[in-house]
Image (cartoon, helix red, strand yellow):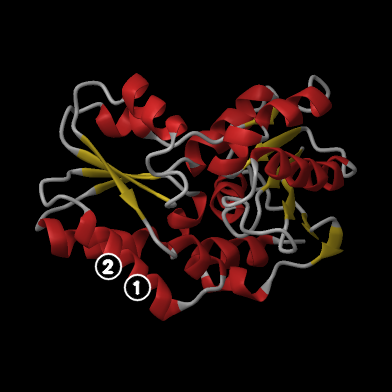
Amino acid sequence: MRIALVDSGLGLLAAAAAVRRLRPDASLVLAGDPDGMPWGPRAPEEIAGRALDCARAAAAERPDALIVACNTASVHALPALRAELEPAVPVIGTVPAVKPAAASGAPFAVWATPATTGSPYQRRLIEDFGAEARATPVPCHGLAAAVEHADEAAIDAAVKAAADLTPPDTTAVVLGCTHYELVAARIRAHLVQTTGGPVTLHGSADAVAAQALRRIGANADPTAPATGSLTVFASGRPTGLPDTARAYAEGRFLAARAS
């Protein structure tokens, strides 16, 4: 089987690694857009256009499914991607894990890019799935860019700033940008310092990977032989996994399992 993933940059690594853990025999096609990133500040129609360009490069590899491993693209590009690719290629979007974070009814926070924080999309998500729990939107200034460039100092500064904005009684945090999952351990460590207790992090990578397999009628089989290949596109150009990807456990995992 072959699963494609689309994002502007390294945010797709978490979902790609999740697919590879569930099915080591799955071949992966990673289609990023270094020429056009970040997508967040762009107009919705421009985001849709760039995501379509990435998806077309990936679709040439004849994937069984395509994951939109980006919250911004899932909001603005999902209808266009589905109109072009489905039903031949199922398209799976990414939704921040607000529902499971709110399930206990305890206070939780939603960490997201400044463009997403306070957006109508995020407000609706919290209203629809936040139940009765108190939700605090937290803008993470510069965190996605710092992760993309593997800038250690900038990552720590951005995570600390966001943790300082998170109420001390917070018990769970939704990682509302796929880039954030790559630095989950650092986020958790800073939150323990500011809240004084354990904080559960809710990402979307595992759920979206499982959904992709369900959409193509495949079962998880972590014991399958690690025979899956790795194909990478940068703004439509064939390339290899960028060096910055290897700064993260997910990137090293994918590189080590590539064949």
Q: Splitting the image into 4 quarters, where does residue 255 fall?
A: bottom right
Residue annotated with mark 2 = 160
Q: Residue at x 29, y 34 (%)?
A: 101
Q: Using a 10 Å C-alpha cutoff, classify the residue at mark 2 as few (fewer than 14 neighbours), some (14 to 19) or many (20 or more).
A: many
**Would residue 153 appear left or right of 201 to someone viewing this image?**
right
Say which quadrant the N terminus sits in. Answer: top right
Q: Which mark is residue 79?
A: none
Reading the image, the residue beneath label 1 is 156
| Vertical side of 139 occupied by 256: above or below | below
Give the x, y percent position of residue 60: 90, 43
Say which of 179 and 126 sits in front.
Answer: 126
Q: Three-letter amino acid code at disc 1?
A: Asp
* Residue placed most toward the observer, 127 or 131: 127
Give the residue drawn at x 11%, y 52%: 168
The 10 Å Cα crowd at callout 1, few under 14, some 14 to 19, many 20 or more, is some
Q: Among all residues in the image, which is located at the extreme front?
A: 43
Q: Residue furthest bottom?
A: 153
Identify the residue at image location x=32%, y=23%: 127
- For the question of whether residue 247 can be seen, the reply is yes
Element under label 1? helix
Query: How many angstroms separate mark 2 from mark 1 (CA)?
Result: 6 Å
Q: Quadrant of the C terminus?
A: bottom right
The amino acid sitting under disc 2 is Lys
Query: Could you say where residue 92 lies in the image, as x and y percent from the top left?
Result: 63, 31
Secondary structure beneath dot 2 equals helix
Give residue 129's quadrant in the image: top left
| Residue 91 location (% of width, % of height) | 70, 29
Camera sees residue 25: no
Residue extending furthest toward the right = 60
Instruction: Confirm or deny contact between disc 2 and disc 1 (CB under 8 A).
Output: yes
Picture coordinates of residue 185 (x, y %)?
A: 34, 62
Residue positioned 57% across, 50% down in the render: 40
